[in-house]
Amino acid sequence: MGAPTPSGRWIPLVWGLVACALIAQIIYPLVSGNSRDGVTVAVVALLAAASIVHAVIARGPAWTLVLVAATAGLGLAAEMIGTATGFPFGSYFYATDRLGPDILGVPAVVPLAWTAGFYPIWCAVGYVLERTRTSPKWRSSQRIVITAAGMVGWDLYLDTQMVTDGQWTWTSGNSGLPGIPSIPFTNYLGWFATALIMAVVIEYVGKRFDTRSKYGPRVSDAAPVVLFMWTWLGSALAHAALLEGDELKYSAIYGFCAMGIVGIPLAWMWTWQPREDSVTV
């Protein structure tokens, strides 16, 4: 038996972080008050850590720096502008002293949520596109747009759940989706635009540093794909049956359908098409 590759040595850590993140999310509906706030922070931190560690071993440290800068960095900038001006998400504010220290009114954990949400979606979209007959000429632009749409789907879960829990509140009187009046429709447009910029940066800047196909055995995207599937299906179940809140019943449907743009073909390919993974992670 050969010695594990340098990347392979970190595989147990990735799966350990994934497992802890899933356990924390299972605990979330079982607690309330300060305990739930602590679990919320833990979930975000664990998901972000799993994404970052996987990105380092699968695509290299330089690519991961681009990922963090594009998601956490641009995400923080968008949140700071958003809370100060109401653009691009609408007028909203965060609850104080619930999610830990803040940066100019934005909880410091929030930028990590952008990374934690973006990376699994990015990997899931890539998995689907690599196994379709999509022309390589158009694959980059398709990945950018579909990833941004997937982020909106994730936000349909995230914002509705956090608003229901009182973590942040919109103050604009703009109309929202049927069944979710507390979140203005402009929020989803803002999410799409912000995620689109992130995806453009990662696609065209990050590809210069991606070591995925250059050195050593290819590390699969099994871990982020599992996180995507868990988020897509688990959030739908939680909103429909495990969490209290009238708007959550609607976000279960909206989020399932929107993320299903990626999730349905991904589930079919993951189940029925052979995988070309040289390292399982």
Image (tube, rainbow, N blue to C red):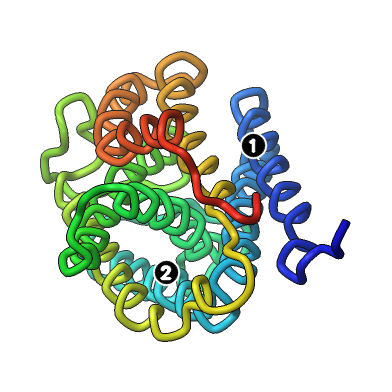
Q: Nearer the viewer, residue 28 or 260?
A: 260
The crowd level at tag 1 (other Cα within 10 Å; few <14, some 14-19, many 20+) is some
Residue in view at x 65 percent, y 50 percent: 280
Q: Nearer the viewer, residue 49 or 170?
A: 49
The crowd level at tag 2 (other Cα within 10 Å; few <14, some 14-19, many 20+) is many
In the rendered image, residue 14, in percent from the top left (x then y), is placed at 70, 54
Q: Nearer the viewer, residue 145 or 207?
A: 207
Q: Residue furthest left?
A: 175
Q: Amino acid at mark 2?
A: Thr
SS for callout 1: helix
Q: Is residue 36 above or below residue 203?
A: above
Marks 2/1 in contact by CB < 8 Å: the verdict is no
Q: Amino acid at mark 1?
A: Leu
Residue in view at x 71 percent, y 67 percent: 7
Q: Is residue 127 above or below residue 272?
A: below
> Which residue is label 2 attached to?
71
- Residue 48 picture quarter: bottom right
- The label on residue 22 is 1
In the rendered image, residue 29, in percent from the top left (x then y), is placed at 59, 25
Quadrant where the N terminus sits is bottom right
Residue in view at x 40 percent, y 85 percent: 208
Residue in view at x 49 percent, y 21 percent: 243
In the rendered image, residue 199, in percent from the top left (x then y), is placed at 30, 68
Question: Mark 2 vs mark 1: which is more N-terminal?
Answer: 1
SS for callout 2: helix
Residue 53 visible here: yes
Q: Residue furthest front?
A: 1
Q: Is residue 65 above or below residue 19?
A: below
18 to the left or right of 73: right
Q: How many marks?
A: 2
Residue 86 visible here: no
